[in-house]
Image (cartoon, rainbow, N blue to C red):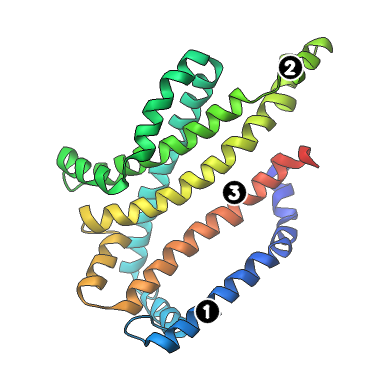
Amino acid sequence: MKFILKILKDFPAYLWNGWGALASIFLFIACWDLGAQVYGELVLPSPLKTFSTLYEMLQTEKVWAEIIITTKRAFFGFLMSAVIGSVLGLIAGLFATASMMSRPIVTILMGMPPIAWIVLAMIWFGMSDNTIIFTIVVASFPLVFVGALQGTRTIEDDLKEMCDSFHLPPKMKLTNLYFPHIFSYIFPAWVSALGMSWKIVVMAELLASNNGVGAMLANARAQLDTPTALALVVVMIGTLMLIEYVVLEPIKREVELWRD
């Protein structure tokens, strides 16, 4: 509870420290507007047109329902890949044989294009949520697995010997040595997996679902409705940034205070 209260208390500071990120976003929007003036509204609608379309879309309950469906799928797939990848990566990191045996499998999984997994999942599971979630898990799992594996394998033996020489209790070893080191590897892997989940869920919905943001993108493509398509892209990017910078980043800053 104290940890959560501290995050809420320091939240304005986190926002202030993110001014550089906000500046880059405004610069991107300025370049976007310039591109709209060069190529025209049909090819690249202006930010004003896109955000006005988004505002109109968000006035309807149907759009919110589709966004919630996509968010649930992405979050559930990410959660599964994070848990499975973290557990198996930590276990593989403890044993050199398991680490060596897992390397070619992870290479295969990471080298497989997500679109190929979607096609296979459509054959195996049909046009269902299982297709989308399976694709998210199999595409995101290797990222988390490698992060957990590297975090476990790279703990320095000198630090372990120092802890043993001072006869530190197991709990203190866990909280002061193992957890901070492993977390510094596994947290970026979680963030990468989260981004991958959001990319995959839209792609899978576009090909293998009749609902969700991906299905709405497919309809916009069929109708050549570029403003709606861009508005949906803004929805997905905004949701991802909200989760990463409002939820995950404050947690990361608090847990990694030991670096300072």
- Place of residue 6 in the rendered image (x, y in percent of width and height, measured from the top left): 74, 48
First reached walking from the N terminus: tag 1 or tag 3: 1
Residue 232 location in percent, x, y? 37, 68
Which quarter of the figure is the C terminus placed in? top right
As drawn, which residue projects farthest toward the right? 166
Amino acid at dot 1: Cys
Q: Is residue 128 left or right of residue 25?
A: left
Q: Is residue 8 above or below residue 137?
A: below
Query: Dividing the image into 4 quarters, which one contains the N terminus?
Result: top right
Are dots 2 and 1 in contact, CB under 8 Å? no
Q: In the depicted view, which residue is nearer to us: 204 or 102?
A: 102
Question: Mark 1 or 3, which is nearer the eye?
Answer: 1
Can the viewer see residue 137 in this picture?
Answer: no
User: Seen in the image, is 244 located left or right of residue 84?
Assistant: right
* Relative to 152, residue 35 above or below: below
Does residue 120 sit above or below 156 in this rendering? below
Determine whether the residue tagged by mark 2 lies in a helix, strand or loop: helix
Q: Which residue is mark 2?
A: 160
Quarter of the figure with residue 224: bottom left
Task: Tell whether label 2 touches label 3 (CB within 8 Å).
Answer: no
Tell me if I can see residue 43 in this picture: yes
Query: Which residue type carries mark 2?
Result: Lys
* Residue found at x 24% / y 66%: 218
The numbered mark, 2 or 1, whose residue comes first in the sequence reads 1
Write the residue at 44% across / 89% down.
Answer: 37
Residue corresponding to mark 3? 248
Question: What is the crowding at mark 2: few (fewer than 14 residues within 10 Å), some, or many (at least 20)?
Answer: few
Identified by mark 3, the residue type is Leu
Mark on residue 31? 1
Which of pointers 2 and 1 indicates the residue nearer the eye? 1
